[in-house]
Structures are given as C-alpha cells and as structure tokens.
Image: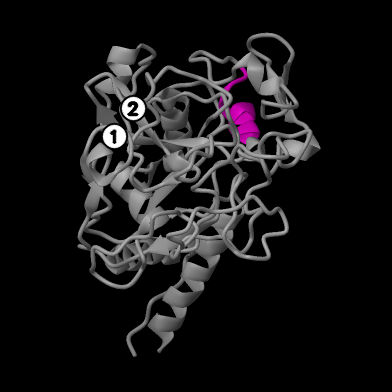
Amino acid sequence: MKKVFAVTAALALLGLCISAQAVTIATVPVGDPGNAGELSGAGAGGYGPDRICGSVGYNYNIGKYEVTAGQYTDFLNAVAATDTYGLYYTSMSYTDYGSGITRGGSSGSYTYSVASAFVNRPVNYVSWGDSARFANWLHNGQPTGLQTAATTEDGAYYLNGATTNTALNAVTRKAGWTWAITSEDEWYKAAYHKNDGVTGNYFDYPTSSNTAPGRDMADASGNNANYYGTPYPIDSPYFTTVAGEFQNSDSPYGTFDQGGNVYEWNEALIHDAYRDVRGGCFYSGSHSDGPYYLRASASSRNHYGDDYPTHEAYDLGFRVSEVVPEPSSLIALAGGLISLLGIRRRRV
C-alpha cells in the first residue's frame, strides 16, 4: 500500500509540474484504436484527391481547440527574441483578419503581446513550418531560448533550419514524439468518426451531424459553425470566433471548431508538393450542398492540392495531437520522481 501511495503522490506532483507550464493545451482522448477509415475526396462526392482517411491504430489525445493567439504569443516570447526562422508574420497584428499579435523591440530583444479580444481566438498567418516548430517546443517542455535543436529545430520533427518548401516537405514525424501537428487520420477521426467503437461509421460534418451546420452564435440547436454567410463576419468586427464559441456543436470525441473558423494544417503530403489543410474557414462558401469545405468528403480546398508548407495566410491555423503515455512509462517516470524527491521505498 505504501508503494502505491508513493507512486500516486508522485504522479500528483508530476501533474502539478505539468499544469505549471506557461501554455496548457486542453485535449480530449480519442480511443477506438484500429477503427476502419472511409473514402474522402471527389470519389466520395466531395473535393480533392481521393484518400482513405480516419483509421488510427492507437489511442491519442487531440487539442480540444485550435491553437490560440494567446498560446502562440507565449511561444514567441519564449523562443523568438531573435526570430531566426520567421515564426512571426507582420499580418498577425491585424485586428480584423489577423490574430492581434504585435511585436516590439529589435532583433535580439523582440517581445510580443496579443490584444485581449484575440487571446482565445485561433492564431492564423502560421505556416506548416511554424506549426511544426510550435509542436517541437511543446515536445521539448516549452523551453526558453534561441531557435535551436533544444527548442524548435528538433523534437517531434527534425527541422534543422528547414525553411524552404522542399526541405519542409521532406520532414516526417519521428518515433518517440509527445506532441505533434495532427496527422490527417488523427484529425479526420477526431472530427467525423462517430465514436461508436472500432467501426467505419462517420458523420458528414464535425458537429456530430449529417446535416450542414447553421451559423447561430447562440448555438441553441447544437449544429453551428463559423463560415461565410449573412451577416458576415459572424462575430463582427472579428472574422474568427472564440475557441469553443459553439458550445453545443462539438464532435463525438469533444473537439470544437474542426469545421469553420480557420483551416487547420495536418501532416499529409499531397502531390509531393503541398501539405494538407482541413475543415474550412470563416471565408468558406455555402453552396447548394452546404458549407462544402467543412464536409468530411472535402479532402482539400482546391482540386490540385492544398498549400505549400511555407504559406502563411489569414485562413490558416493548426491543432496539435499528444501521445498517450503507456502505463509502464508513467510508473517509470513516477519512480524517477520518487527517487528525486528522496522518498524511501520500503517492502510491505
């Protein structure tokens, strides 16, 4: 009993350490490992190249919300006093289409701040490379310092200064990752799978519905999202909405805003030239078939691919995934913490 109590106490202390970090990413668990995928793309009545999506063979956690401007600002202040790899884009400062993030000072002593109205809205004007560096920073424990292997250039991804489309398209997720940009399958499953076991059952929209969502900010119906319509923008004068604004319109696994708000980068490489984006944005149109880029069958936002990984735009953001530690890893980690704290282990 004493050993069990010591391990429990150590894990509790470990939890306090995690929660004390500068950025806390709220996540939801995604189970049902080994579920079947489904066809997405033109062959499924949608848009873009045909792919089988949504099958994931492991448990994982995914960001409950898109990464916010407030979280990204903390990241910038930690690693971008000298912004070696251009993690800040000046259009982020816009207070309509942007993220409300401004930069002050000069290189070597840059500081960043975010307007209060944008703290909990999704960051935009981020490239795939920016998103990978944020994931590496989380993987490395949110350190402070220059943009090096210890902060942004290694971790879930070995970037090593990659800034070109060719170099970034060659990057893959490493074994042993703890945080990463969502893979396409991780993203798709969390958005559309019905969370009904190891099945191939999916909704058409990431609001737990087969009916096109509406645009009701009050969200009384529980099937709403931020996309183009009347009035526009939906939360004037801001084009994005606060994370989780549509509080009754979550996916079956409990994520929010995987439809509308901003497109979200994922790891998929399309036509060897583009990184995939999913989910539509506040500017996604509503045709006779509904807000079509929010649909599961819309495998890209154009018929040829998606975006070069260096692209930074008003409609591009991202979400992260987190590995679920094996129980044995947690026990080993707790044991190390017990030793560190000088807790004596005794036979019972």
Which corner quadrant holds the C terminus? bottom left
Q: Position of residue 132 (x, y in %)?
A: 41, 31
Q: Amino acid at mark 2?
A: Arg
Quarter holding residue 191: bottom left
Say if mark 1 contacts mark 2, CB within 8 Å: yes
Q: Which residue is mark 2?
A: 275
Foreground of the two, 213 or 123: 213
Residue 328 is a magenta residue: no
Residue at 23% over, 42% down: 175
Foreground of the two, 237 or 94: 237
Is residue 110 at least partly visible in the picture? Answer: yes
Residue at 67% over, 29% down: 99
Q: Position of residue 288 (x, y in %)?
A: 48, 42
Is residue 279 at least partly visible in the picture? Answer: no
Q: Which residue is mark 1?
A: 268
Q: Position of residue 224 (x, y in %)?
A: 59, 55
In the displayed image of the protein, which residue is found farthest to the front?
Answer: 288
Residue at 68% over, 17% down: 110
> As drawn, is 89 to the left or to the right of 274?
right
Quarter holding residue 202: bottom left
> As drawn, is 30 to the left or to the right of 50?
right
Q: Residues within 10 Å of mark 2 (few under 14, many from 20)?
A: many
Disc 1 versus disc 2: distance between alpha carbons? Answer: 6 Å
Q: Residues within 10 Å of mark 1 (few under 14, many from 20)?
A: some
Relative to 299, say whether 61 is above or below.
below
Q: Amino acid at mark 1?
A: Ala
- Is the stretch drawn in magenta largely helix, strand or loop? helix
Q: Position of residue 325 (x, y in %)?
A: 34, 60
Ranked by sequence position, the earlier of labels 1 and 2 is 1
- Segment colored magenta: 72-81
Residue at 56% over, 26% down: 79
Which corner quadrant holds the N terminus? bottom left
